[in-house]
Amino acid sequence: MRSSARKRLHNRSIKSQLHTLERGYLQLLGSGKKDEATKAFQKISSAFDKAAKSGVVHRATADRKKSRLGLRLAHAK
């Protein structure tokens, strides 16, 4: 298997995991579970930082996503 194909699959799985974490976080916010949403926000922030560190997503994209998700948490409280 070409290394580019292997890396593409690896990056795709990480992006899929990020989308899943984000979807779960937004569901928690929508249902009003703020304590659980805070814990989920910590997990998703860490996941975005790790993805940016390894180059799966751009650093600015990760920062923007974390900022917007954090604002949603702040407005929910």
Image (cartoon, grey):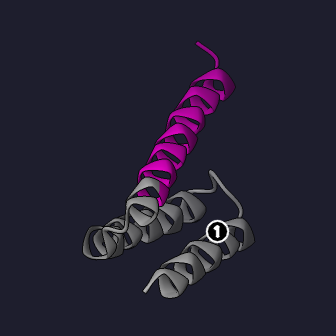
Residue 73 x %, y %: 48, 79
Residue closer to the observer: 23 or 46: 23
Location of mark 1 (residue): 65
Image quadrant holding the C terminus, namely bottom left
Please identify the residue farthest to the front as the structure is shown.
31
Query: Is residue 23 shown above or below 10?
Result: below
User: Quick one: SS at disc 1?
Assistant: helix
The residue drawn where x is 65% and y is 22% is: 5
Residue 17 x %, y %: 46, 43
The residue drawn where x is 57% and y is 74% is: 66
Lateral position of residue 54 relative to residue 77, left or right: right
Lateral position of residue 58 relative to residue 48, left or right: right
Amino acid found under the numbered disc labelled 1: Lys
Query: Is residue 32 shown above or below 57?
Result: below
Q: Crowding at label 1, few (<14), some or many (≥20) Cα neighbours within 10 Å?
A: some
Residue range (magenta): 1-26
Query: Is residue 77 shown above or below 48?
Result: below
The image quadrant that residue 71 belongs to is bottom right
Please check the rendered image and state whether residue 8 is part of the magenta-colored stretch, yes or no: yes
Residue closer to the observer: 63 or 29: 29
The residue drawn where x is 26% and y is 76% is: 35
Image quadrant holding the N terminus, namely top right
Residue 29 x %, y %: 43, 66
The image quadrant that residue 34 belongs to is bottom left
Secondary structure, magenta segment, majority class: helix
